[in-house]
Amino acid sequence: MQKLFPVKAYRNYIFVWVVLLFLTFVTWRVSFVPLGLMNVTVAMLIASLKASLVALFFMHLRYENKLVWAFALLPLGFLSLIIMGTLVDVLTR
Amino acid sequence: MPDEHLQHGESPETVFAAAKLGLWTFLATEILLFGGLFTAYIVFRLRYPDLFHAQYQNLNRTLGLVNTLILITSSLTMALGIAAIRRGRQWMSRVCITLTILFALGFLGVKYVEWTEDFSRGLFPGTNMFFSLYFMMTGLHGLHVFAGISVLIVILVMSCQGRFSEQYATPVEITGLYWHFVDLVWIYLFPLLYLVG
């Protein structure tokens, strides 16, 4: 029987996990340093980096076809539309 | 045994791809469910920056960190459990799924300690806008963790019955997708609620 999925080495997952723990610790440490607006920027950049690692490696998005990618990214596009549309309304009232 | 899962003479590849796509579709609706709360958070944070700055300091940043580490580790054990069953290693897969359930229970345990502390200090969902959002967002996420634990227990029982093999492990795979999504939501909740004032 043909392989349904790529069998990945356990150490790949452990490496991603170590990077995730490291990034979590970094974002926690940085939160104690007052950087003004940069605090939010750094926290969101690190969160997005962590989210990408989880999606690409743990959820195997790396090995998925374009259709699955579309289903993963389209709701993010809709969410940004919702947020932008709401802000345009709220901020200009 | 795997043949019972096939319908209409479709290939196992098609059936597996359809199951995964179905779960990704469900996750799309989940993103929009949490998205409403994230939108509310952004709107009220922009409107009441001082309130948010004063209130977020009431949260225990260390417990937030501990819970993030627990949930990320539970994602690792889930991924390893899937990698194990892909190799046909039944016992390692069962051990990994059990560890995932234990970490998830640990996460809820820490959450319980935090909420108890909040309540004892008079911080309730109705206290102010920050705590309304905090309880709503962590509460909805906690419900997802609880649902994840329930599904993982079913998966563990099925695994112990010998229902999965290197040829067929679709329920384990898609439960894993859902579990990683629960981790993803927390990856954003942790900095938004605990780290940025």
Image: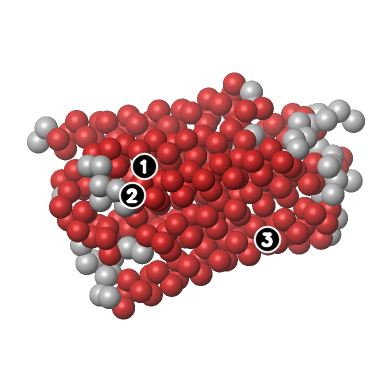
Where residue B163 appears, as percent x and y from the top left, is 83, 52
Answer above or below: position of A75 versus B68: above
Mark 2 secondary-structure assignment: loop
Q: In the rendered picture of this protein, how many numbered marks are placed on residues? A: 3
Q: Chain of mark 3?
A: B
**Residue B13 figure quarter:** top right
The Cα atoms of the two marked residues, 1 and 2, are separated by: 8 Å
The residue to which callout 3 is attached is B99
The circle on residue A61 is: none
Residue nearest the observer in this picture, B25 or B40: B40
Q: Residues within 10 Å of mark 2 (few under 14, many from 20)?
A: some
Can see residue B4?
A: no
Which residue is the extreme one toward the left?
A93
Residue B27 position, x and y percent, is 52, 41
Q: CA distance from mark 1 to mark 3?
A: 29 Å
The image position of residue B52, as x and y in percent, is: 21, 54
Circles 1 and 2: CB atoms closer than 8 Å = yes
Mark 1 or 2: in front is 2
Q: As shown in the figure, which amino acid type bears the numbered disc 2? A: Ser
Please state the chain letter of the residue tagged with numbered disc 2 in the rendered image: A
Residue in the image at 56% along x and 66% along y: B106
Asked if labels 3 and 1 touch by Cβ distance under 8 angstroms, the answer is: no
Q: Which mark is residue A31?
A: 2
Is the residue B14 above or below the residue B95 in the image?
Answer: above
Amino acid on which disc 3 is placed? Leu
| Label 1 Cα neighbours within 10 Å, binned few <14 / some 14-19 / many ≥20 | many
